[in-house]
């Protein structure tokens, strides 16, 4: 086992956050296999599902379930084991734990007790799909699963309209068409990529606009497999000309709003330097009508 406890750690045990394959078992790292063999216990989202992975690599370490319905209770139990010097690995059904998967409550609990927590990096659906999506990768925002309720989902999408980073969403195959139908009028027909069944037998990437992706899916009797949707961020607004700025100021002038307040509001709404707006307001107010 790795000797990894940093100076200041109060207890000898270590919690490893271990990424596992999305579907193709060959994507397991050498280090992940070794850690899972060496730890005293594996906390798994679904022990029955993870048994296949462990059997494939000859890992005989005992498992305990740790999922969204029992995580708070199991965190206390695992905390005591770590305090006693046990080393524990946390795995989810696929990919990196905590990323739209259980584990946050456990990690938060363990971190509060100054116990060593180490990542064992590996597969992640959001990053794997982004690398082949054909969309900008210099800045991206992981949004996870949108709310299931239509009204809450619309509010969440409205809040992302001006986001310039590439947007990444997880969605179930049962809801992906409904999500696209609601996303299209709110965000507009942007460039996008739908990744389905990443690394699995029926792996697929549909690139095009949101409308084109929706049309493709609607021709199918049903959509199968977990989906990751990548959407290009908002385009920057065209530069505002001096004439347009003057028109905007004239339309918003109010006798009860001071020059500074008006300049601050317009500068904020239009992403312009406040001094530029302020000077234009003064020029207009000093110009004889």
Image (tube, rainbow, N blue to C red):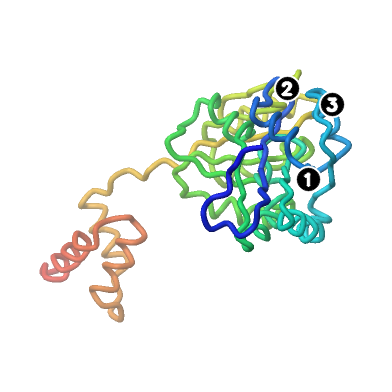
Please report the residue visible at 59 percent of the width from the left and 29 percent of the height from the top.
128
Q: Disc 1 vs disc 2: which is toward the camera? A: 1
Residue position for label 2: 24
**Rendering coords of residue 183 (x, y %):** 62, 43
Q: Who comes first in sequence, dot 1 or dot 3?
A: 1
SS at mark 3? helix
Please report the residue visible at 53 percent of the width from the left and 50 percent of the height from the top.
6
Residue at the limit of the structure toward the bottom, as seen here: 256
Q: CA distance from mark 1 to mark 3?
A: 16 Å
Q: CA distance from mark 1 to mark 2?
A: 21 Å
Q: CA distance from mark 3 to mark 2?
A: 14 Å
**Rendering coords of residue 98 (x, y %):** 67, 47
Q: Who comes first in sequence, dot 3 or dot 2?
A: 2
Snapshot quadrant of residue 25: top right
For the C terminus, which image quadrant?
bottom left
Relative to residue 38, is residue 235 drawn left or right? Answer: left
Residue position for label 3: 55
Nearer to me, 146 or 59: 59
Placement of 234 over or under 267, stated as above or below: above
For the N terminus, which image quadrant?
top right
Q: Who comes first in sequence, dot 1 or dot 2?
A: 2
SS at mark 1? strand
Snapshot quadrant of residue 175: top right
The dot on residue 43 is 1
**Rendering coords of residue 180 (x, y %):** 66, 39
Residue at the limit of the structure toward the right, as seen here: 48
Relative to residue 275, is residue 141 drawn left or right? Answer: right
Alpha-carbon neighbours of circle 2 within 10 Å: few (<14), some, or many (≥20)?
Answer: few
């Amino acid at each position: 086992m790795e000797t990894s406890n940093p100076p200041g750690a109060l207890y000898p045990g270590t919690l490893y956050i271990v990424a596992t394959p999305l579907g193709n078992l060959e994507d397991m790292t050498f280090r992940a296999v070794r850690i899972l063999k060496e730890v005293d216990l594996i906390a798994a989202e679904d022990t029955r599902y993870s048994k296949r992975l462990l059997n494939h690599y000859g890992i005989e370490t005992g498992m305990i379930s740790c999922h969204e319905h029992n995580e708070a209770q199991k965190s206390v139990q695992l905390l005591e084991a770590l305090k006693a010097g046990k080393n524990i690995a946390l795995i989810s059904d696929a990919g990196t734990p905590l990323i739209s998967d259980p584990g946050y409550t456990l990690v938060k609990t363990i971190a509060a007790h100054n116990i060593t927590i180490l990542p064992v990096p590996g597969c992640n659906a959001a990053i794997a799909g982004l690398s082949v999506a054909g969309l900008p990768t210099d800045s991206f925002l992981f949004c996870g699963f949108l709310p299931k309720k239509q009204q809450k989902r619309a509010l969440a999408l409205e809040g992302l309209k001006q986001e310039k980073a590439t947007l990444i969403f997880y969605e179930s195959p049962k809801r992906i068409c409904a999500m696209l139908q609601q996303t299209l009028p709110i965000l507009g027909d942007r460039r996008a990529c739908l990744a389905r069944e990443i690394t699995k037998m029926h792996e697929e990437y549909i690139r095009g606009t949101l409308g084109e992706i929706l049309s493709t899916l609607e021709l199918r009797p049903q959509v199968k497999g977990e989906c990751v949707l990548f959407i290009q961020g908002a385009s920057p607004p065209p530069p505002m000309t001096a004439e347009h700025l003057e028109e905007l100021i004239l339309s918003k002038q109010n006798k009860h709003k001071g020059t500074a307040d008006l300049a601050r509001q317009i500068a904020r709404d239009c992403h312009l330097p406040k001094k530029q707006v302020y000077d234009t307001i003064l020029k207009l107010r000093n110009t004889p009508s």
